Image (cartoon, rainbow, N blue to C red):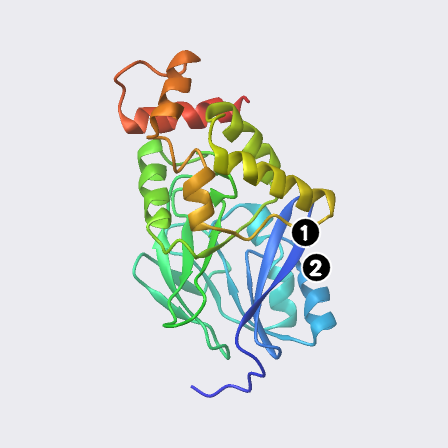
Amino acid sequence: MTTTAQHAPAILTVPAFADNYLWMIHDGVHAAVVDPGDAAPVLAALRRHQLTLTAILLTHHHADHIGGVPELLQHYAVPVFGPRNEAITAVTRPLAQGDVVQLPQLAARFAVLEVPGHTRGHIAYARADADAEHWLFCGDTLFAGGCGRLFEGTPEQMVESLGKLSALPDDTLVFCAHEYTLANLRFAAAVEPDNLALKARVQIETEKRERGIPTVPTSIGVEKATNPFLRYREPAIVAHLIAAGKLAPGASDVAAFAALRQWKNTF
């Protein structure tokens, strides 16, 4: 496949709403956008950077992730990739676990991971190009310092989904969809207060936000060291769950995860 690319693919951060991030994969000429909940900032970014939209990638059906698709399609006749197991009428390329997406006009391929939990059919996109920087677009499954609420799926599903993501290389850059990091880290510090890596991260991320800098992307390695939803088996976290009356002694790992998620819901 030939392309008029001027550069290797890069990522543009497109803020939207109060705390969403829409991600634009581009090469200086062509662009694909991930989870465009709002068309206006996407169209503005395309104009500002003189890019042509060639594809839309969706992770799940929530309005803040798909709401801008109809307007974008009025301007650009492009394929819409999205989860096979969710009812998103705009999707023209339904995807499931094991599929690989070649972005039109862009030198970037992505492996599709099914990661239900937040929604029943949620998918994620992990870059599949050899010798390229590792990227993950995970929607609302994994957040910096947290994970998505279980609106439709089960704790068992979310545990399996997060396990798939945490098995990616530690240097994988995680492009999640919201700026929830400081709130997530406040909870993380409450359930694992002696985690030194977490204490250092709180300081780093707080300084970023004070300067108006996004805390995303994060990385799989950072999340494994500091995110309680990847660390729910850690004895210190289990002990805090038990001490807080959230978990019975001897409960299963999945029960510990479920208790942690429930606690975060009301934290």
Q: Nearer the viewer, residue 104 or 170?
A: 170
Q: Residues within 10 Å of mark 1 (few under 14, many from 20)?
A: some
Q: Nearer the viewer, residue 144 or 120?
A: 144
Question: Which x, y percent locates residue 247?
Answer: 36, 16
Q: Residue at left 49%, top 48%?
A: 61
Q: Tell me if residue 247 comes above or below residue 67 in the rendering.
A: above
Left or right: residue 266 versus residue 20 is left
Q: Which residue in the protein does label 2 denote?
A: 41
Type of the residue with mark 1? Ala
Q: Residue 181 got which mark?
A: none
Q: Which residue in the protein does label 1 denote?
A: 16
Quarter of the image with the C terminus is top right
Q: Residue at left 33%, top 37%?
A: 159
Q: Tell me if residue 148 comes above or below residue 169 in the rendering.
A: above
Q: Residue at left 69%, top 47%?
A: 17
SS for callout 2: helix
Left or right: residue 46 versus residue 135 is right
SS for callout 1: strand
Left or right: residue 35 versus residue 99 is right
Q: Nearer the viewer, residue 68 or 146?
A: 146
Question: Which x, y percent locates residue 105?
Answer: 50, 80
Quarter of the image with the N terminus is bottom left
